[in-house]
Each structure stands twice: as C-alpha cells, then as structure tokens.
Amino acid sequence: MVSAGEATVKLRGVAKRYADIIAVDYVDLDVKYGEILGLLGPNGSGKSTTLKMILALIRPDSGSVSVLGIEAEDDPVAVKRQVGYVPESPRLYEFLTGLEYLDFVGDIYGLDASEKKGRIEEYLEAMELEGREGDMISSYSQGMKQKIALISAFLHKPKLLLLDEPLSGLDPRSARIVKDLLRKLTAQGVTTIMSTHILEIAQAMCDRIAIMYEGRLLALGNMKELRQKARLPGSDLEDVFLKLTGTEDVREVVEALLK
Amino acid sequence: MPVPKWLVVARNEYRIRINSIRTIRPYFPYLVIALLAVYVAFIAPAVVSLFIDDLLAFFLSQVALAMVPIIMFIIFFYFIILPITYTLQGMQAGQVEIFLAAPIKPSDVLLGEFLGVMPFYAIAITVMAGFFTAALNPLGLDMLQIAITVIIFVATFLSALWIGTVIAALVRTKFAKSARGRDVGRALSLVLALPMIAVMYAIMGGGLLEALADPGTSGMVRAILSLLPSSWGAEVIVNFASNPGNIGAVGFETLTRFGGLVAFFVAVLWLGTKAANRAYSIEPTTFTASRAKPDGFFYRTVRYLGGGGSFGTLLVSVFKDYGRRLENLSRIAYIVGLIAMVNIFFGGGFDDPEAALLMGLFLFPFLAVLVVGQVTAGGKESLFIYKKTPFGVGRFVKARLLQGWLVAVPIGVAITVVSMISIPQTTLISLLTYTGFMALIVAANVTLALGLSLLNPEFSENTRTQMFGLIVNAQVAMFVSLGIFIGSLIVLDLGFLNTVLLQTVVIWLLGIVFLYLGKRRFSRIE
C-alpha cells in the first residue's frame, strides 16, 4: 500500500499498439496519492486505453503498470479490488432496477449485507435517486444511468478512481454534487484520474493535468506549469491545450466555414 | 461471509432472464417445480399412454437404434446453439466491461452465467426426461435404469449447455466490440438453426424414418453418430429398452458409454473454465475501418430508377443501409433456405406445378415482412432525419416500398421458377402465368408488410424484441394469405388459378389500405 507523498499509480514505458496504430506510446507517469489528475487529449489520443491499462482491463505491449504498489499484470484482481471505474459509455443491465444493479455490484465487491445496504441508501440519497431505485434502468435518463455508474464506482470505497468522462449527461446540480464528492474523497486520500473533454471542469477540479496526443504524454503539471510550457501566461486551459496539441488553428477553420 | 462471486453472477443472470415476469418472481421457482412434478407424475404418463403401443414398438425396433441417437443429437445441438443464438442476438461488450473491471475471475463469471440460465434449460431437460422415462417405464425398467436414464439426460444436455455457454462467451468477445461484429453475430444467429431444420424436415418428409428401417443405413448412421457424446447416452437408453430390469445383461456397454458421458461432462467443465480467460476480454480485435467502394453499376441503376434526383439518392441510401447489414441478407438466406428445404424434402410428392407453388404462397408474406418489416427498428433517431424534412416521411415510405419490391420480387420470381421447372407437367404458359402472378403477390405482400410495420413500429435496438415485432407482423400477413386461400379454394371451390387471382387482388387492396394507414400513423409519431 502507498501513503501520502508516494505515487498511487506508476506507469513506466507503457506502450500499446493495435496493428499499425500506436494507441499509447511509451508513457511514463506518476499519479500522486490523493490528487485529482485530469487526463486530456483529442479523440484517439490514448486516454481511455491508458485508463484501461491501469485497471488491467487490457495488457500493455511493453512497460509496467503499478497501482497502489501492486503490479497490475501480476495480480489484476487485487488491483480491481482497490479501484472504482466509470467507463466512457457505461452499459448497465437495462432489465435490472437501479437497486438490483447496485446490489449486484456490492456483492461482486464482497460488501457485507448491512454495509452494502447502508452505502447504497447513502449514495442514492446523495445522487437524488431516492424513490427511483425500484425503476428499471431502461427507463432511466442518460444522467440517471451515469449516476448509477458513478455510485457503482464509489460503492466499495476504492482508493483509486478511474473516471472516463464522469460528468457526461449530468445536469448542473448533479455535476456539482459529483464534483464536491470527488473533492471530499480526495481529502480522505482517494486518488482520482479523470479523463474529460470539458476543459473548464478539468481546470477547476484537477490538481494536475496530463495532456496526451497521438499516444504520447505531451505535458504534465498544474495550470501554472502548463501555461509556462505553452508560453501563454494568464491563458485558460483551452488556449493552453490547443497550443500544446498544435490544434489552435480553429479560427481559420471557422472563417473557412463561414465563407 | 461474502457470497461466492459465481453465485452473485448467477443470481444476476437469473434476475435478468426473468425480468418479464418480475411480479411473480418470488413464487416462480415453486410454481415451476410444482408444475413439473405434476407433469412427471401425471401428464407425461397420461400422454404416453395414448400411444404406448407405438412407442414400445418403436423403442424395440431397428429404427430406434439410429433414431434415438438422432433425436438426442438434435436436442444436444439445440442446447449448444441456444445460448450462442441468445448471445449473438443481443451482444453488448459494455456489460463484459462491468465484470472485467470488478475483482472477479473470468471462470467465476462463466460459471455464474451458466448457472443463471440453467434453471430454464432444466425445465426442458425435465420435460424430455419425464417423457422418455414415462415411455420406457411400462417395459419394466428397474429403479437403477430409470436413475441412469435421468442422469444421461442431465449430463448430456448440461454438457451441451456448458459448451454453448463457453462458445457464446468466446463469440461475444470476438464480435461484440464493433458494429460490424455485432451485425455478423445477428446474421449468424438466424442461419445457425437451418441445419437442424433440415434434419427435422428430413425426418418429417424426407423418408429418413423409412431409410432407417434398413439395417445397413441404420448401422451407418449409428456409426457416424456414435462419435458424439449425445449418442453414448442414447445407446444406453436403447439397450435398457431391450433389457428392462436386467442391467447386468448390458453392464459393460452401460459402464463404458455412461462412464464416457460422465467423463465428457467433467472434461468439458474443466476445459471451459480454462478457456474462460480467453472468453472475457475487451482487447480490441481490429482497428481496421470498413471502407465502402465508390458506387458501381448497381447503385447507379437504383439511382436512375429513383429518378436520378434527390429521391434517387434517398433510394440508394435506403438500399445501402439495407444491403450493408449482413443481418438483412441472412434473413433472405433463411427464408430462401426454408423454401428450398421444403421443396427438397417435401417436393417429391408434388405431381403438378400448382402444388409446388403452395409453400411459396404461404412463405412469401414471411419473406416480405423480413425484407421491409424492420422499417423503424434501431431507434427513433433515424426517423427524425425524415420527419424534420418537408415531405420526408412520404419520400421515406416510397423509397422503402421500392427497395422492398426490388429485393423481394426477384427472389419470389426465382423461387417460383425453380419450384415449377422441377415439375415435368409445367408448360411455358403455366410458368409465365404463375410467375407473373407470384411477382404481383410478392409485391402486394411487401406493400402489406410495410403498412403493418408502420402501423406497429418497433423502435428497439434489441434483436430479440425486433424479431418479436417481425413475427407478429408475419403472422398477420400469413393469416391473410391463408384465410384467402382457404376461403376461395376450399370453401368457395374457385380453383387454383382463380384463388391466386383473388389472392393477388385482395392482398393488393389490403396492402394499399394498410400502407395508407401506416404512413398516416408514422407521420404522427412524436
């Protein structure tokens, strides 16, 4: 196990290819204990693949992934026991009720009955799903499904959260609840790696930001460090991101479209 | 103490499967057990007693030596393909991700998925074992023989179910990760059943029973089937029928075959758990994007037929969307295969061209529903493309109608021609007349099927739900054809040609009315 000051996640020379496509290109990354790390990058930059390799869902072609001191390849089940994961598009069991689904997830993580019941009630109340837990998931809105996916990631009190677009589909109030919850969990020592395209959220929430591009780790640091790297003092994350990824020529694109 | 992970998965799988009867879920197992007990104790013996003499004669005959292994093989095969078909129809890689992200071993997931569906298959096994034991009991089988017979059914079909579950998991891993893979899966799910339908038709109309009365043929079939574990148990059952109450007379055969079956069951269980790691993976299998070639002669012709302008483009788009889905092509293959098998196995008895056309006449509504019956499936989103444009719905319906005619009519014509030219009495005049009528009937059925599907739209993306909607529409269309046929040929005695003529007119009229009503309803859907 790791403690404050140590790295919860260590990636060393991690690479993943699919035929001719390089998904992740020899990435080295340390994620500190109790921080929220934002993982940014354009579509296809390797963010989701990186998250999946951290969770041992897919194996890297080379390099090593260590999570809370456990080598992911050696003991994937032990890693998964410590991690809460929300995929980019969670596919829940549509023909279970929200409560049945959470009950199932609680059992999978081996929670005892009373502990499971208490936590489910607590999270359902926090996420304002009380009264809807007996409805089929198929009848839920996208935001409600996302809330269920988030609860299922928080339920077993993981030490590491891997969240792929966690606020997708949530209304502003629910998004605020999740953001506050993540901050409280961080204060309790939970480490979070969050992949998102919403740069404002990343800027507001993350202690550090990692920018990936074509499988490579392009930049890593807090806002100040990223601004320095991009040589854009005083700019927001959007300008920094576009500059660092070399995709800042949006004005020309817009002008061409308006011609 | 925490619940074992495989039991958690099994309970979840069971809950999903009985979702549609969740109001009676707490009582469901007791209800089923009670009904099965009544079946085994009273219903099966009562049903068997109605034709007990024939059954006993069958079990003691030459035919049974090969027929029982064939029956066991058919059921064995079905138990393998049922979980595969179920998986292929509704594959979702995202749900596998739920398991893989959790601290659970793939072998526990596999075992859980198997145990979760087992109660439903256990019902079928109990029904079959109950029937066989009721049929064999009057011969005087002792308790040990009856117990072994029941174990044979359990071991044979649970082995098959386990094999099917493992293959289903492997297939899901292979296909579920991409839209093309899921399409291939849905296509396969339909045509998988065709070989077994062929065997059943061969038994029903192909003279298989008569052929098996010959010791040479029977011996050959037995020798081939004896390689399969389903036959090992079958041979034990046939031996018991010949030696009731005297297991010692067939002790060695029983020991080797029954022992072999139990060993097979244990071996497949072990191998399945070993294959589990391969069966649950979300590693992408391909990153190759499907690329379409530029429009060739066919699409240029379709665009021309659609007037060349914007409607021509719409028609080509409808064709591409239809033709690029293997699922649609497999449905055509299925219905053509079905008609071909009917002609092969039952066609020997046709002595005039009209009789050869009958099956087509009843199956063309099914063909029409399969071609245009899914006009709304796959979500409402695509519907908005048409609804948001001026006259979009009308143009969409027109395009689907034309597409349905262009696909179904040539198939109907080809089936008619092939069915008729195999009959020596067919003349050129009768061939041309009936082919023309059949083309008109297929076109009318397409119109009717499109109208029905617009009236009864199915927006689900789930293949099983879609198929249910299709079957409902197909039943309506087939009953229309059947009703006209019985009314005109049998009740009014109008003769075959007049019946075909009447059928053409009535289906066209109904088709136009239903299409009008369907389009109206479709325009008003919000």
Image (cartoon, rainbow, N blue to C red):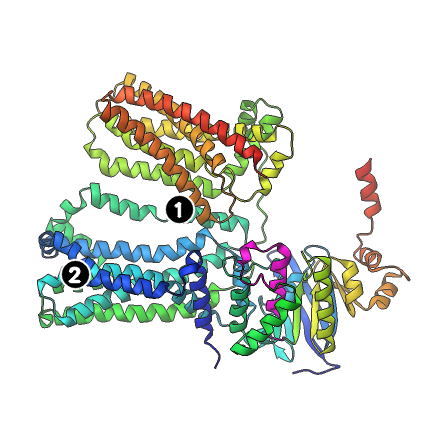
Q: Give percent across and percent down for residue B519.
A: 52, 30
**Label 2 vs label 1: CA separation?**
34 Å
Residue type at the position of mark 2: Ala
Which residue ends up furthest to the top in the rendered image? B429
Instruction: Please tell me whether mark 1 sits on a helix, a strand or a loop.
Output: helix
Which residue ends up furthest to the front in the rendered image? A131
**Quadrant location of the C terminus of chain B?**
top right
The residue shown at (45%, 57%) is: B171
Q: Give percent across and percent down for residue B360.
A: 32, 31
Q: Earlier in the sequence, mark 2 or mark 1?
A: 2
Res. A25 image quadrant: bottom right
Cβ–Cβ under 8 Å for marks 2 and 1? no
> On the image, numbered disc 1 is attached to which residue?
B190
Side of A137 relative to A181 (left or right):
left
* Chain to which the residue tagged by mark 2 belongs: B
Q: Is residue A144 above or below residue B268?
A: above
Residue B134 disc label: 2
* Chain to which the residue tagged by mark 1 belongs: B
Side of B320 relative to A255 (left or right):
left
Side of B95 relative to B20 (left or right):
right
- Read off the magenta span: A131-157
